[in-house]
């Protein structure tokens, strides 16, 4: 059986992607983050996880952000619409990708580190 070089390259890249983008329990969300709408959220460590609070209105946006089953999960609240949703957070280089889910609907948003 002959394995082509292109197959090996693709396999290597897939394995590297998993290693580079995997989430870790040691990820640190602490600091100030700018939302897509221009708001500022300050995330700080609390007990076993993190909490995110709006800087201007002091409203809890992320509640009980914890590492569970290999993922960062939290409950997210939209303060203007007064709606909550479960979400998964993925740490990227200088931003957070947030996938919020409520029922069958989902929305992806990004926050950038300040």
Image: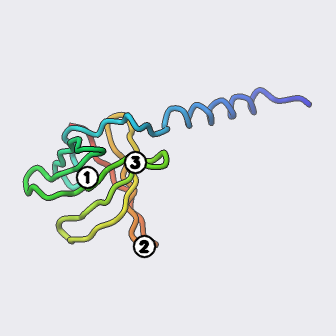
Image coords of residue 71 (percent x, y)? 45, 47
Q: Where residue 60 is drawn, which disc sits there?
A: none
Q: Tell me, for residue 36, which label it has, or none.
A: 1
For the N terminus, the image quarter is top right
Within-10-Å neighbours for mark 1: few <14, some 14–19, many 20+: few
Q: CA distance from mark 2 to mark 1?
A: 23 Å
Tell me if mark 3 has few (under 14), some (14-19) or many (20+) residues whose alpha carbon lies within 10 angstroms of its own: many
**Residue at disc 1, secondary structure:** loop
The residue sitting at 23% across, 64% down in the picture is: 78
Q: Position of residue 48 (x, y in %)?
A: 30, 44
Label number found at residue 103: 2
Q: Where, quadrant-wise, is the C terminus in this rendering?
A: top left
Q: Are the residues at dot 3 and dot 1 in contact (C-beta closer than 8 Å)? A: no
Q: Is residue 84 left or right of residue 101?
A: left
- Which residue is labeled 3 in the image? 72
The image quarter containing residue 46 is top left
- Mark 2 Cα shell of 10 Å, populated few (<14), some (14-19), many (≥20): few
């Amino acid at each position: 059986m002959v394995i082509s070089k292109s197959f090996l390259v693709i396999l290597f890249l897939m394995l590297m992607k998993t290693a580079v983008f995997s989430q870790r329990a040691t990820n640190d969300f602490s600091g100030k983050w700018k939302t897509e709408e221009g708001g500022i959220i300050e995330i700080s460590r609390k007990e076993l996880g993190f909490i995110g609070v709006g800087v201007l209105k002091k409203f809890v946006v992320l509640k009980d952000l914890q590492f569970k089953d290999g993922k960062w999960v939290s409950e997210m609240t939209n303060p203007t619409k007064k709606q909550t949703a479960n979400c998964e957070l993925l740490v990227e280089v200088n931003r957070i990708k947030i996938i919020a889910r409520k029922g069958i609907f989902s929305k992806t948003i990004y926050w950038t580190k300040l």
